[in-house]
Image (cartoon, grey):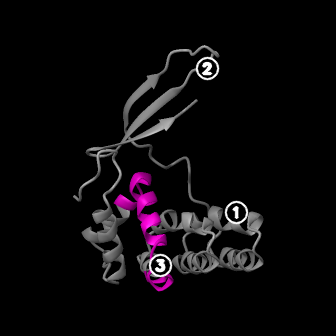
Amino acid sequence: MMSTTANGFVSKTERLAYLEQLLSGKLPAGPATEHLLTRLMNPAVRGPFLETLLLQPLPTIRDCVANLAATGDDRAATVLSPLLHSLDEPVVLLTIDALRRLGSPAARPALAERVTYDQRPAIRQAADEALANLPEEAVPTSDVAQLPLYAAYLTAVDGAGGQMALVARQWEENEIALFHVI
């Protein structure tokens, strides 16, 4: 397992290693691809990885996105969907194309959002065409397993009468995800 920084985010070295692995075009079904996709499902890993990816030249981004989609794994839709919010139109268009090729129903909500809210006509049209090619069945939300509970905390009531609940769930062996509930 690669190193993480003190704040739980992956190091720049790990982000670049994931990028290099994706660019190699050698993502056979197996433990290496499984590990990569599992790590990228963690928001603390996915966010910095995508930030690093967006700093790359467009051909590098295109190859990386295409290789992720080529895995055929539904988790790739979750990893790629944030790229639909890029301000760079070519990045959004190549992501839409990759999600269309992936063919995962998990991409439907993100593509539908682009059809409804994106101001750029080319993006709306491409997202609409991609939606037409995706299977209709929705991803079951009730059957999705929650991460194991690690701890729950309730803050004291502050001077304004506010209070916050925090839930910590264990992502992997040494990684914790913290959620603000109220």
Give the percent coordinates (x, y) of residue 12: 32, 62
Which three-letter amino acid code belongs to the residue tagged 2? Gly
The front one of 77 and 3 is 3
Residue 47 is inside the magenta segment: yes
For the residues bearing labels 2 and 3, Cβ distance under 8 angstroms: no
To which residue does mark 3 refer?
61
Element on which disc 2 rests:
loop
Q: CA distance from mark 2 to mark 3?
A: 44 Å
Q: Which residues are magenta?
A: 39-63
Q: In which image quadrant can residue 149 be found? A: top left
Q: Is residue 25 above or below residue 175?
A: below
To which residue does mark 2 refer?
162
Give the percent coordinates (x, y) of residue 37: 37, 65
Q: Could you tell me which residue is drawn at 43 percent across and 78 percent down?
A: 64
Q: Could you tell me which residue is drawn at 35 percent across and 51 percent down?
A: 9
Q: Residue furthest left?
A: 1
Q: Assign the magenta stretch its main secondary structure.
A: helix
Q: Earlier in the sequence, mark 2 or mark 3?
A: 3
Which label sits in the foreground, 1 or 2?
A: 2
To which residue does mark 1 refer?
113
The front one of 74 and 137 is 74
